[in-house]
Image (cartoon, rainbow, N blue to C red):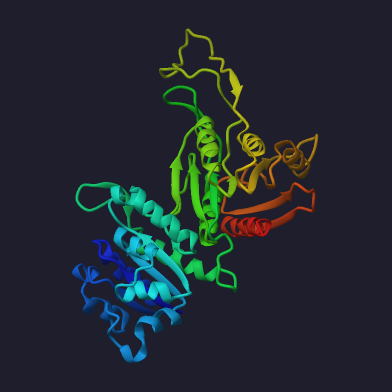
Amino acid sequence: MRIILGVGGGIAAYKSAFLLRLFKEAGHEVTVIPTAAAEQFVGRPTWEALSGRPVSTSVFDAVDTVNHVRLGQEADLVVVAPATADLLAQAAAGLAGDLLTNTLLVTRAAVVMVPAMHTEMWQHPATQANVALLRSRGTVVMEPASGRLTGKDTGPGRLPEPDEIFAFALRQVREAPAAGASPLLGKRVVITAGGTREPLDPVRFLGNRSSGKQGVALARAASAAGAEVELIAAHMDVAPPEGVKTARVETALQLRSAALDAAGRADVVIMAAAVADFRPAEQAGTKIKKRDDAADPVITLVRNPDILQELVQQRRDSGTGPELIVGFAAETGDSRGDVLEYARQKLERKGCDLLVLNQVGQDLVFGQDQTSVSILHRSGDEPQTFSGTKDEAAEAIIARVAEELG
């Protein structure tokens, strides 16, 4: 595959040398196009030595081959890392002052821009507006990581690690349909993941066995399909994907607030989190002590709100909101019915568009890498069943979401 690696003028440019090596070791042909400012951080000899190809910043080099047009036309993938605030602004405005911005205007290949800048610059309304505009045009803008920046600063704006960018960028090509457009391009997808925890006292909580693996896999798959993903994460045993905007919550009430708010700006909501049905009626302010001279404590539980049902009702009342709401059902069968029967009842009761069924139990689903899911549709059609890894199941679910959106 022919890859253009654009490099913006930021301190994170040194990481792009490692990214270049990953692309080369995977057998790809890489042409590096730095900006003039980028060469202040990493010199041209480094890029030429690692890529094995000539490097230029000017539209006036190799004029006989019409280089400023040819490079973009021949590319299969364009990755810009780091993409500074200035470079994002130039791309959004359609400026073409050097070889890199010319290439961005010419290419019809998948374009992935990986921002890196100080937190204040990333969060500035101008930068956020430029990112939104680029995404609306089909450019995939990876969310920056959060961590140590230049100097003592810490926060969102850090360039993700090269291996994360490598995997993310290649997915944009590998998983895109033949027409070259990602199936969820321009769509905003909200995904909840993990298990909520309901405090009993400052030390103890009521929780569940959810690891968050399936929700994280869904976030990866939706991002690879071109969506702008917002992950609402309760307790998880795995890290959220790099480049995905993540909001941390703990309790069911916190998750409810975050989900109802995020749904207002989403095209799709996928409720994969294991949300507690009940919470303690009272939370002790100090640790509950075990004393020989005291009676065993009695814990009274109250119902938590039904977040999935509220999302459906909010959409119905407002006449706006997500085009698609996807629920999850972690079920066990009993003497009254099997898991599929319970899932159908839940789908009818909740009123969501799709329901993903997991049969759970000892050594089933929770914390495991393998899973089996059935996707039920509100129309009552025959369920679609899939078994495999959680990443493979996530890809099947996201493919069904894209199909439902047409």
- Image quadrant where residue 33 sits: bottom left
Quadrant occupied by the C terminus: bottom right
- Image quadrant where residue 185 sits: bottom right
Q: Is residue 239 visible?
A: no
Kindly identify the residue that appears in the image at 49 percent across and 64 percent down. 138
- Expressed as whole percent of the image width and height from the top left, the position of residue 130 reads 39, 57
- Expressed as whole percent of the image width and height from the top left, the position of residue 364 reads 63, 46
Nearer the observer, 346 or 319: 319
Kindly identify the residue that appears in the image at 80 percent across and 48 percent down. 380
Residue at the limit of the structure toward the top, as seen here: 293
For residue 170, side relative to residue 147 (left or right)? right
- Expressed as whole percent of the image width and height from the top left, the position of residue 118 reads 27, 51
Kindly identify the residue that appears in the image at 69 percent across and 40 percent down. 331
For residue 176, side relative to residue 112 (left or right)? right
Q: Is residue 94 visible?
A: yes
Nearer the observer, 139 or 287: 139
- Tag count: 0
Nearer the observer, 45 or 323: 323
Residue 373 versus residue 248 in the image, above or below: below
Kindly identify the residue that appears in the image at 40 percent across and 84 percent down. 70
- Expressed as whole percent of the image width and height from the top left, the position of residue 186 reads 53, 58
For residue 372, side relative to residue 391 (left or right)? right
Nearer the observer, 288 or 183: 183
